């Protein structure tokens, strides 16, 4: 079946560091990928829609200069948390669905746990 | 914005059927009902989706009421590994942005 891979699965870094998270669709092409954030004991919150070859679309309240998204190919989207601070510590999850086919379920990566010290 | 309402938690005895309800009274005619589950510290896993007909796959069955205002996910023989948070999501045919609600935390009891 379809697989979405995220890397890294866990990262710990110092405050002020920028962190890049990769999301790859392993066996299908994805024009659109999605990035979510999940705080402990809360639901997933959609952060942005990543569009291949164009700018990402951010949800209200999400800082686009803080969370840089690049979708350079049909199988890879990256999320960079710039100048990360402790409040950015969270579980970041990406998803993707098959290109060009309607009503296809989204497939989620296993998430990246980000801890900022 | 989430358009669904689910009970916050449920228990189910191992081996019994788990019936998880979802209310989506404002659903539009072209919106699908999707179910996902999230086991602790993992990404959500797709379970099933449907428009108006009942659906069944190897994981579960989805029963959608005739007026489409509610649905029930059925896990026919719950196991301990089915303990997870289950999310019901409605999605238009033309869109694919998922907005998650709070879900139902299902605990399967030995």
Image (cartoon, grey):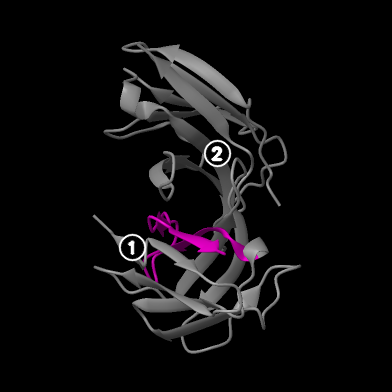
Res A105 → quadrant = bottom left
Residue at screen point 38% across, 55% down: A110
Picture coordinates of residue B52, whole percent (x, y): 51, 37
Res A90 → quadrant = bottom right
Question: Which one is nearer the viewer's eye here, B89 or A3?
Answer: A3
Left or right position of A42 against A27: right
Picture coordinates of residue A84, whole percent (x, y): 60, 74
Q: What residue is pinned by disc 2?
A: B88
Picture coordinates of residue A33, whole percent (x, y): 47, 70
* Residue at the limit of the structure toward the right, as seen here: A61
Residue A4, disc: 1
Q: Are marks 1 and 2 on the same chain?
A: no
Picture coordinates of residue A2, whole percent (x, y): 28, 59
Instruction: Please give the range of residues in magenta.
Output: A88-117
Judge whether A39 appears above or below B77 on screen: below
The disc numbered 2 marks a residue on which chain? Answer: B
**What SS does tag 2 mark?**
strand
Residue A28, disc: none
Image quarter hosting the N terminus of chain A? bottom left
Residue at screen point 58% across, 86% down: A55
The disc numbered 1 marks a residue on which chain? Answer: A
Residue at screen point 66% across, 38% down: B4
Magenta span contains residue B47: no
Question: Which one is nearer the viewer's eye here, A40 or A106?
Answer: A40
Res A83 → quadrant = bottom right
Image quarter hosting the C terminus of chain A? bottom right
Magenta span contains residue A101: yes
Looking at the image, is mark 1 or mark 2 nearer the viewer?
1
Query: How crowded is the residue under tag 2: few (<14 C-alpha within 10 Å), some, or many (20+)?
Result: many
């Amino acid at each position: 079946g379809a697989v979405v891979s995220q890397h890294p699965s866990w990262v710990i870094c110092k405050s002020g560091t920028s962190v890049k998270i990769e999301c790859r669709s392993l066996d299908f092409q994805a024009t659109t990928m999605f990035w979510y954030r999940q705080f402990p004991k809360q639901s997933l919150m959609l952060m942005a829609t990543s569009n291949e070859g164009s700018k990402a679309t951010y949800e209200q309240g999400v800082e686009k200069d803080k969370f840089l998204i690049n979708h350079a190919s049909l199988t890879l989207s990256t999320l960079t948390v710039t100048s990360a601070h402790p409040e950015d510590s969270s579980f970041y999850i990406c998803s993707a669905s098959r290109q060009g086919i309607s009503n296809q379920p989204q497939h989620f990566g296993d998430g990246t746990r980000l801890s900022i010290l | 914005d989430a358009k669904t309402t689910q009970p916050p938690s449920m228990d189910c005895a191992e081996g019994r059927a788990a019936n998880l309800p979802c209310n989506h009274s404002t659903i539009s005619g072209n919106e699908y009902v999707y179910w996902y589950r999230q086991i602790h510290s993992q990404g959500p896993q797709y379970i099933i989706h449907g428009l108006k007909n009942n659906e069944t796959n190897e994981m579960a069955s989805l029963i959608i009421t005739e007026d489409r205002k509610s649905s029930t996910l059925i896990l026919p023989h719950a196991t301990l590994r089915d303990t997870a948070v289950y999310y019901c999501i409605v999605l238009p045919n033309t869109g694919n942005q998922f907005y998650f609600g709070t879900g139902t935390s299902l605990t399967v009891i030995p």
